[in-house]
Image: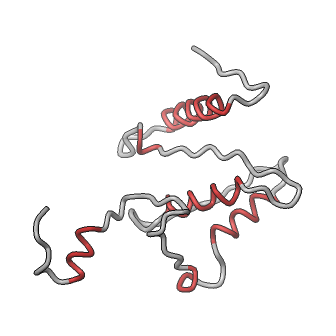
């Protein structure tokens, strides 16, 4: 590893930072920026909204931002919040799909995305061995 002792602090910090690494909610490197984002914690707001949504009506959320700003890290926090039981209600079963792991996001067609999501549902639900769930084999 090269000696970085003579470099300015900001340069050393930049060199050890990996902005594309998504952090799980329990990672000590995660920093809560809610105070500078405004009054509402978006993750808690989304979790509350999804819990209150009617199962008879679709609920859509748009979560956007530039590359490396923490979208995936925040989605990991949302996943953890939704999986927690609230009162006497069980938590959600969240299927998290990272398209960039298996598909070329620069050449992505909607059918590719649908097949990917279906495959992830099959794989993740099958791994849980839920009663009554039978994986489809083709």
Picture layout, residue 4 above or below residue 109: below
Nearest the viewer among 23 and 55 is 23
Where is residue 38 drawn, in percent x and y? 60, 84
Q: Is residue 41 above or below residue 66?
A: below
Left or right of residue 3, residue 49 in this image: right
Q: At x 81% / y 60%, what residue is drawn? A: 86
Q: Position of residue 72 (x, y in %)?
A: 50, 58
Q: Indicate the quadrant where residue 15 lies.
A: bottom left
Residue found 48% across the figure and 33% down from its top: 112
- Quarter-wise, where is residue 125 in the image? top right
Name the side, left or right, on which 72 lies relative to 9.
Answer: right
22 to 29, vertically: above or below: above
Judging depth in this view, the residue of 117 and 28 nearest the camera is 28
Q: Residue at x 54, y 44 (%)?
A: 97
Q: Nearer the viewer, residue 77 or 137?
A: 77
Percent position of residue 19, x then y? 35, 64
């Amino acid at each position: 590893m090269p000696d970085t002792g003579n470099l300015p602090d900001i340069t050393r910090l930049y060199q050890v930072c990996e902005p594309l690494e998504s952090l799980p909610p329990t990672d000590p490197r995660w920093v809560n920026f809610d105070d500078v984002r405004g009054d509402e914690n978006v993750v808690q707001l989304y979790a509350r909204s999804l819990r209150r949504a009617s199962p008879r009506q679709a609920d859509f959320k748009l979560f956007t931002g530039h590359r490396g700003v923490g979208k995936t890290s925040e989605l990991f926090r949302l996943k953890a919040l939704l999986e927690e039981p609230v009162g006497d209600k069980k938590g959600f079963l969240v299927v998290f799909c990272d398209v960039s792991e298996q598909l070329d996001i620069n050449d992505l067609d909607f059918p590719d995305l649908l097949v990917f999501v279906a495959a992830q549902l099959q794989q993740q639900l099958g791994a849980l061995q839920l009663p009554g769930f039978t994986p489809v084999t083709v």
